[in-house]
C-alpha cells in the first residue's frame, strides 16, 4: 500500500499536464494542434501531427534562422528587382535601396514582410534557387523529413508543404538561437534604408505578445490555403511551453493563452487538489 501511494505521489509531481483539458482541445476547430512541454520534453497534446499542411509564413522561421546562422548581420544588402517580385505583406522597398541584413531579418520575422524575406534569401543564398536548396538541406538535417520548401516566404507555390511535427522540430531548433529569440519577442522594430534614410516600422502580427505576459515568440502565418497559423512559446518561472496551431478557425490568441495557462498550473496546485 505504501509503495502504491509513493508511486502515485511521484506521478503527480512529475506530470505537468494534469490540468490539460483534452476534451476541450479535441473540440477546437483547428486542422492540427501540438502542445509540448519543453521543460520536460513531453508532448502534452497532439492532433494530426503527421498531416500534410501548408506552413504559410511559418516558413520564414527557416529563412531567418539560416541567415542568422550564416552571420555577418551588419552587412549591407542592395534591393534588386527580383527581391520585390512578391505579394503582400510587403515593407515597400525600392530597387537600389540598401539595408542591413539584420533589419531585413527582423522585418521578415516581426512583420512577416515578403520583400524582406526574399531579400534575405537572395543575399544569403546568392541566388534564390541556391537558398531553396539550403532550406531543404537544413530541413533534412534537423529531422523535417516530410517537408519541401519551394520559396522563402511561405507562398503556396508548387509542392511547398510541411507537417505539424516538422514545424515543431523547426521551432525547437530555431529557439535554441538567442538572436532568433530576441527578435521574435519584439513588438516592433524601426529601421532605415542606409542610402535614402527612408524610415520603416515593422509591427508584429503576433497579438499574443501584447495580450499575454508570459509570451516570448515565435511566428504567425496565413495564406488562403493554410488558414490562420501560429507557433507560440511562453515561459513562466521554470515552465516552458511551445504550441503549433494550424488552420485555426478559433481565436488563436485566446486559445493559445488558455492552453498555456493549463500547462502552467503549478505542481503544488495539482497536489493540493488530491
Image: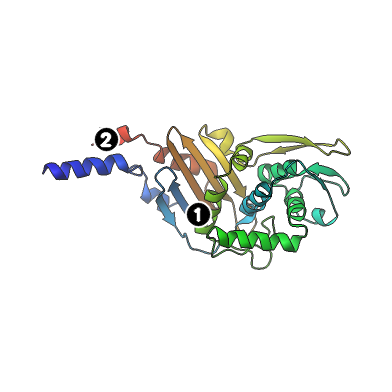
Report the residue that reaches farthest toward the left: 1
Q: Residue at x 72, y 39 (%)?
A: 202
Which of the two labelled residues, at mark 2 and mark 1, occupies the earlier sequence position? 1
Q: Residue at x 63, y 62 (%)?
A: 136
SS under mark 1:
strand
Residue 147 appears left or right of 203: left
The residue lying at 48 percent from left, 63 percent from top is: 50
Question: Does residue 169 appear in the picture of this structure?
Answer: yes
Residue 178 coordinates in the image, percent (x, y): 59, 40
Q: Nearer the viewer, residue 254 or 162?
A: 162
Dot 2 alpha-carbon crowd within 10 angstroms: few under 14, some 14 to 19, many 20 or more: few
Q: Quadrant of residue 223?
A: bottom right
Q: Would residue 273 appear left or right of 247 to someone viewing this image?
A: left
Q: Nearer the viewer, residue 7 or 90?
A: 7
Asked whether the residues under the numbered discs 2 and 1 touch, taking CB atoms below 8 Å apart as contact, a structural biologist would say no
Foreground of the two, 243 or 127? 127
Q: Quadrant of residue 154?
A: bottom right
What label does residue 30 carry, if any? 1
Instruction: Pinpoint residue 255: horizontal percent, then vertical percent.
Output: 49, 44
- Give the CA distance from mark 2 to mark 1: 32 Å
The numbered disc on residue 38 is none
| Residue 257 locus on image (x, y percent) | 48, 39
In x, y percent, where is residue 133? 68, 63
Give the label on residue 271, or none. Answer: 2
Amino acid at each position: 500500500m505504501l509503495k502504491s501511494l509513493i508511486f502515485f505521489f511521484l506521478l503527480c509531481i512529475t506530470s505537468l499536464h494534469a490540468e490539460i483539458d483534452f476534451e476541450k482541445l479535441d473540440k477546437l476547430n483547428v486542422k492540427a494542434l501540438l502542445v509540448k512541454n519543453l521543460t520536460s520534453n513531453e508532448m502534452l497534446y497532439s492532433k494530426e501531427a503527421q498531416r500534410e499542411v501548408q506552413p504559410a509564413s511559418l516558413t520564414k522561421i527557416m529563412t531567418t534562422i539560416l541567415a542568422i546562422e550564416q552571420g555577418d548581420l551588419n552587412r549591407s544588402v542592395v534591393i534588386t528587382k527580383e527581391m520585390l517580385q512578391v505579394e503582400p505583406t510587403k515593407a515597400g522597398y525600392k530597387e537600389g535601396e540598401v539595408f542591413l541584413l539584420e533589419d531585413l531579418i527582423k522585418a521578415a520575422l516581426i512583420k512577416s514582410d515578403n520583400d524582406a524575406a526574399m531579400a534575405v534569401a537572395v543575399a544569403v543564398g546568392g541566388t534564390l534557387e541556391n537558398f531553396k536548396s539550403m532550406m531543404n538541406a537544413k530541413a533534412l538535417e534537423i529531422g523535417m523529413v516530410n517537408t519541401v520548401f519551394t520559396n522563402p516566404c511561405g507562398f503556396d507555390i508548387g509542392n511547398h508543404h510541411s507537417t505539424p511535427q516538422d514545424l515543431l522540430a523547426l521551432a525547437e531548433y530555431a529557439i535554441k538561437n538567442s538572436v532568433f529569440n530576441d527578435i521574435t519577442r519584439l513588438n516592433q522594430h524601426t529601421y532605415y534604408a542606409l542610402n535614402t534614410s527612408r524610415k520603416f516600422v515593422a509591427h508584429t502580427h503576433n497579438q499574443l505578445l501584447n495580450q499575454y505576459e508570459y509570451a516570448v515568440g515565435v511566428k504567425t502565418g496565413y495564406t488562403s490555403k493554410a488558414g490562420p497559423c501560429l507557433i507560440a512559446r511562453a515561459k513562466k518561472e521554470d515552465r516552458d511551453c511551445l504550441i503549433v496551431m494550424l488552420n485555426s478557425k478559433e481565436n488563436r490568441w485566446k486559445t493559445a493563452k488558455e492552453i498555456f495557462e493549463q500547462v502552467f498550473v503549478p505542481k503544488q496546485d495539482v497536489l493540493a487538489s488530491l
